[in-house]
Amino acid sequence: MKALLIHQHGGLEQIRFEEIEDPQIGSGQVRVKTRATSLNHLDLHILGGLPGRALALPHILGSDGAGLVDETGEGANRFSIGDRVMLNAVLSCGKCEFCLEGQHSLCVKLRLVGENSSGTHGEYFVVPEANLRKIPEPVSFEEAAAFSLVFQTAWRMLKTRAQIGSGDDVFIHGIGSGVSTAALRIVKLYGGRVFASSSSDEKLKLAQQAGADFCYNYTQTDVVKEVLDTTGKRGVDIVVDTVGNATWIQSMQLARKGGKIVTCGATSGPNPATDIRLIFWKQLEILGSTMSSQQEYQEVVDLLAEGKLKSVIDQTFPLSEGKKALQYLQEQKQFGKVVLVV
Ligand code: ZN
């Protein structure tokens, strides 16, 4: 099969679209004939090499995918050949205390498809059957491939960790990324107000069309002052910060007293300046989050099936042009997900 892979870590020049052996299936596994996959920032982190993590090379990138069941391994009997399926990339051990409590994203051996095992950006991918769900009927392969990783992440961040309430005010930094646009959809599902920032007027216009209530171009305006004016000096209930270095202090200034800051990433760097006085004086809660449990994943897939949540797709590229698509992602030009079609 053809796949998007790397033989060594580095920059985009390391991305190859090459012929490689078809993946073989083992017991409990399913082989999926890929119809669509989507890019995540994780792809770029893995391309660059994660510290202390040795990867078997060559490595196929990709942690989101959708397609047709092509073959089922021994003991894998939940799906029939030809079923339309979508992937949940979380690989948990199923045996540790956290897995037994249903907290799969806390698994002591947490792994991800595409990070610790071969990924989805190929004509086929092989995963345990427990990681697949049937794609709800009206949902396309592209929408399904754009959905799983970012919506399960944003769902756990907002619902489980920050315990979003009906009508909450939520600030989202750097609107346009997959997780931030998924977060926007979830806040609107809860009837909350979305405050969004970006350096791009074009992205802010799209955010407004997607339901954002207040949009700020941080290169032209004092975001903290504006938000405090809008909220009568109160601040917002929840700040979604996936940016890190560039926004962390602002996040603490934007949150109301007793408010929450929830993070699942740090695209501008992981070591921001902080201000402990703001944390104790405002009694802030700083919450980390990653991926989701199987239950949380099922909840977002159910909401997708009911039409209450919908993927945000920026544009699609053919799998063969994956390198170009990754460059587009690296330049942060997108609003929503970048999808590869096979
Ligand atoms: Zn476990």
Image (spheres, helix red, strand yellow):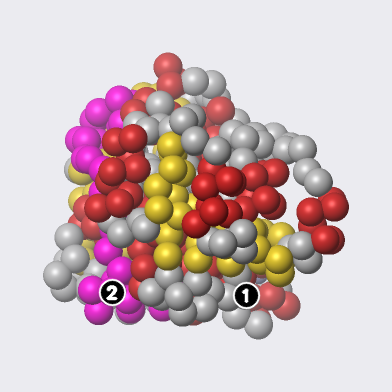
The range drawn in magenta is 297-325
| Residue drawn at (59%, 46%) of the image | 224
Is residue 305 highlighted in magenta? yes
Q: Which residue is mark 1?
A: 103
Name the kind of residue labelled 2 in the image: Lys
> In what element is the residue under mark 2?
loop
Element at label 1 = loop
Q: Please rate how many residues cluster around mark 2, counting C-alpha atoms within 10 Å: few if below 14, some from 14 to 19, many from 20.
A: some
What residue is pinned by disc 2?
A: 308
Identify the disc placed on residue 293. none
Instruction: Tell me: is circle 1 under 8 Å from ligand 1.
Output: no
Residue 331: name its quadrant.
Answer: top left
Nearest the eye: 337 or 73: 337
Q: Name the quadrant containing residue 28.
A: bottom left
Q: Residue at x 28, y 43 (%)?
A: 205
Residue 159 picture location, percent across and down: 52, 73
Q: Quadrant of ligand 1?
A: bottom right
Mark 1 to mark 2 CA distance (whole Å): 25 Å
Residue at the extreme left of the image, as rendered = 138
**Residue 248, position as x, y percentages in the image:** 67, 44
